[in-house]
């Protein structure tokens, strides 16, 4: 090999060694940078974890303190419910301790089919077990009693349908857990004054308050108040349908509270809010035209006036069928809940459940039901959706979602 070529080769080898060294140095630097970055990331990650753990611990501590405070408040308000009882051992959330649930149904008639079923099978003969449980668990259950309890009196002359039920069957209301009965309607005087007075005695004897009728106008228009979870819930009931003006209660005359002229009812709503300090006022009203799925203009106008006077909820019934929902501000008006327990062929109906939270916010839910042959049960699946679809098709700027929650659109 020539000396020249050897030199070239040596130079090339030296150059290769230098370049390899150089590459190695770069790789070392890159590796070091990666390690440093990884270390920084790990430090940041653990710092963040620690911060989160601390925040969670703080939130838990606050929740424990809040629960203890609420528990103390509850114990203070309900002295006959001592802390060593189950509530104290099983702390519940604010909602389950202090939210109040009210359930409303439309017309209930214990007559012929329904009465026969009740006589032979008791309450499970006319209501499904899940509905019975839901009703019994509600803080306040209000129904419309579309008949008098009585053994006396004569059928109202020239009236197509007249109802009257033996007072002993008031046990059906007690079994259901009925807390309040609406009596302002076009059937409660079907057997005249004497059966109406028997109705008052029957309900009084069963310990069930009633609204919308009374021995005189003062009693018929009297606000019924329930104090639950530290809040005052007021209820008024009135009718815009009856066969004769003589059904109206007078100063010394038994009968129903009317809302043909709404002035007295509007004044009662305002007084419930402003003078009697109610946190929540419900107006339970009998109105509309039988079998009509659309409300009359007067129903819309009255609902608006009730809401403007301070009503937080308007529950209507009488047309036998479901009518739609409309909101006036925060106040939902259910124009008609339809027959709830009535007999007859199968039909869609609904109960309304309203939950009022400690901050006065409310949740309104439709309990979809199917009634028929004297038996009412909760609708499930596509049947439930059918009830919601019916309500949605009939409502005015309001809707019911697939879970039954009702809201303005
Ligand atoms: Zn009616």
Image (tube, grey):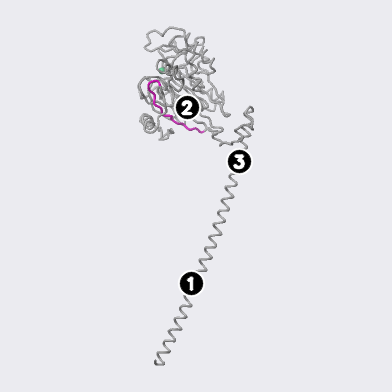
The image shows residue 58, relative to residue 199, as above or below, that is below
Q: Residues within 10 Å of mark 3 (few under 14, many from 20)?
A: few
Q: Which residues are drawn in magenta?
A: 361-374
Report if residue 364 lies within the magenta region. Answer: yes
Residue 333 lies left or right of residue 234; in this view the side is left
Q: Which residue is mark 3?
A: 64
Predominant SS of the magenta segment: strand
Tell me the residue at 56%/59% (across/down): 43
Q: Residue 254, how many percent across, how many down?
A: 49, 11
Of mark 1 and mark 3, the one earlier in the sequence is 1
Element under label 1? helix
Residue 158 lies left or right of residue 329; in this view the side is left
Q: Residue 28, how many percent across, how many down?
A: 50, 72
Residue 56 lies left or right of residue 18; in this view the side is right
Element under label 2? strand
Q: Residues within 10 Å of mark 1 (few under 14, many from 20)?
A: few
1 vs 2, front mark:
1
The image shows residue 58, relative to residue 357, as above or below, that is below
Q: Which residue is mark 1?
A: 27
Q: Are marks 1 and 3 in contact (CB under 8 Å)?
A: no
Q: Quadrant of ligand 1?
A: top left
The image shows residue 376, relative to residue 66, as above or below, that is above
Report if residue 155 lies within the magenta region. Answer: no
> Label 1 vs label 2: CA separation?
75 Å
Q: Is mark 2 within 8 Å of ligand 1?
A: no
Tell me the residue at 62%/33% (across/down): 73
Q: Which residue is mark 2?
A: 313
């Amino acid at each position: 090999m020539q000396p020249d070529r050897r030199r070239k080769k040596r130079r090339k080898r030296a150059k290769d060694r230098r370049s390899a060294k150089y590459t190695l140095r770069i790789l070392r630097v890159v590796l070091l940078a990666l390690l440093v970055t990884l270390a920084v990331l790990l430090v940041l990650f653990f710092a963040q974890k620690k911060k989160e753990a601390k925040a969670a611990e703080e939130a838990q501590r606050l929740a424990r303190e809040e629960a203890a405070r609420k528990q103390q408040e509850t114990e203070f308000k309900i002295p006959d419910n001592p802390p060593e009882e189950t509530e104290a051992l099983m702390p519940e959330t604010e909602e389950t301790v202090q939210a109040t649930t009210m359930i409303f149904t439309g017309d209930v008639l214990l007559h012929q089919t329904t009465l026969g079923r009740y006589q032979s099978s008791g309450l499970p003969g006319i209501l499904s077990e899940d509905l019975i449980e839901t009703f019994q668990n509600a803080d306040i259950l209000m129904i419309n009693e579309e008949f008098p309890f009585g053994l006396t009196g004569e059928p109202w002359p020239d009236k197509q349908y007249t109802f009257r039920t033996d007072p002993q069957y008031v046990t059906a209301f007690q079994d259901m857990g009925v807390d309040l009965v609406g009596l302002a309607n076009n059937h409660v005087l079907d057997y005249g004054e004497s059966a109406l007075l028997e109705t008052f005695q029957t309900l009084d004897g069963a310990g069930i308050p009633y609204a919308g009728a009374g021995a005189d106008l003062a009693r018929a228009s009297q606000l019924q108040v329930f104090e639950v979870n530290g809040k005052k819930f007021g209820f008024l009931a009135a009718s815009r349908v009856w066969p004769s003006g003589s059904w109206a209660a007078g100063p010394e005359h038994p009968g129903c509270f009317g809302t043909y002229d709404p002035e007295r009812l509007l004044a009662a709503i305002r007084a419930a809010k402003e003078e009697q300090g109610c946190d929540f006022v419900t107006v339970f009203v009998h109105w509309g035209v039988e079998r009509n799925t659309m409300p009359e203009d007067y129903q819309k106008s009255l609902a608006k006036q009730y809401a403007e006077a301070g009503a937080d909820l308007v529950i209507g019934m009488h047309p036998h069928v479901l009518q739609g929902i409309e909101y006036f501000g925060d106040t939902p008006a259910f124009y008609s809940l339809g027959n709830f327990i009535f007999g007859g062929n199968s039909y869609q109906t609904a109960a309304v459940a309203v939950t009022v939270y400690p901050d006065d916010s409310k949740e309104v839910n439709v309990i979809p039901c199917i009634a028929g042959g004297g038996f009412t049960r909760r609708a499930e699946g596509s049947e439930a959706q059918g009830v919601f679809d019916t309500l949605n098709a009939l409502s005015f700027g309001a809707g019911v979602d697939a879970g039954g929650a009702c809201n303005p659109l």
